[in-house]
Image: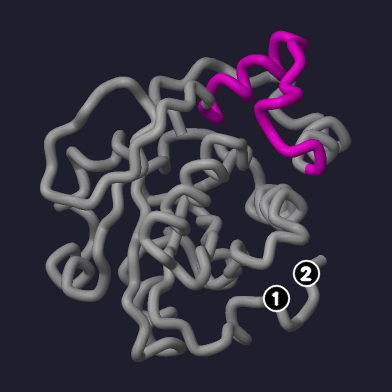
Amino acid sequence: MRSPERSADNLEILKRIGIYGGTFDPIHYGHLILAREALERLALGKVIFVPAAVSPHKLDQPQTAASIRLAMLEAALEGDKDFIVDRCEIQRPPPSFTIDTVEEIRQRHPQAELFYFVGADNVPALRSWHRFGELEKLVQFVVLERTALETKHPFLTIRRYIDISATEIRNRVALGRPIRYLVPATAEEIIRREHLYEESKTLPKKT
C-alpha cells in the first residue's frame, strides 16, 4: 500500500505532468522504461499511472480484476518518487473514458501542462476516442513507440525499441515459461500468487 504523501491527490505544485493510462495487465518493463524516458526527455515533474477499471477499447477481451492489476502496479512502482498511481478510474463506474480522467486531474492541477501517453498501436483510432475534440485541447499527446515500426502522426513521440508486451507475458505464463526480466519481481510475485494468466490465450494486440 502506498503512503498517503505519495498519492495523486497530494502532489506538490507541478508545471508538467505525464498521464499514463492503460489496463497494465500486467505492468511490465516496456511500460516503465518508456515512461522514464518520457519523464526525462519532456522534463516532467511526475508521471501518473492510471489503471483502467474497464477499457472501452477492450470490452471484448478478458481482463484481470482491476484490484489485482492495481496491486501489481503499486508494487512495481513502490519506492519510485517520480511515478505514482491514481485510482480515479477504478473508483468510477466503468468504462474508463480518458476525458473524464484528464478533467479530474486538470481540476486538481489547473496550472500544470498535461501530457497524455498513448501506445503507438492506439494512434489509428485515437480520434474516435470519447469527446476527442475536448480532450486534445486539454493535453499534449505523447506516443510511446517500442516497436521497430514508425507510425506517421503529428504527435510527440518517445521511441525506444523494447520487444516486450503484456500479451507475450500472459502467453509465457500460460505455457509455463519464465517471465523474469520482463516484469518487476514484485509484480511477478502477485502473478504467481493469484495464478494469473495460467489459461491465457493469444491476443491480437500488444499492450
Residue 18 position, x and y percent, is 42, 65
Residue 201 position, x and y percent, is 57, 17
Q: Which residues are magenta?
A: 165-186
- Amino acid found under the numbered disc labelled 2: Arg
As for residue 172 lying within the magenta part, the answer is yes
Q: CA distance from mark 1 to mark 2?
A: 6 Å
Viewer-nearest residue: 145 or 64? 145
Q: Is residue 171 above or below residue 2?
A: above
Q: Which residue is mark 1?
A: 6
Asked which colour scheme the image uses, the reply is: one colour
Neighbor class of circle 2 (other Cα within 10 Å; few <14, some 14-19, many 20+) is: few
Q: Is residue 82 left or right of residue 60?
A: right
As for residue 119 lying within the magenta part, the answer is no
Residue at 46% from the left image edge and 57% from the top image edge: 40
Q: Is residue 207 left or right of residue 56?
A: right
Q: Which residue is mark 2?
A: 2
CB under 8 Å between callouts 1 and 2? Answer: yes
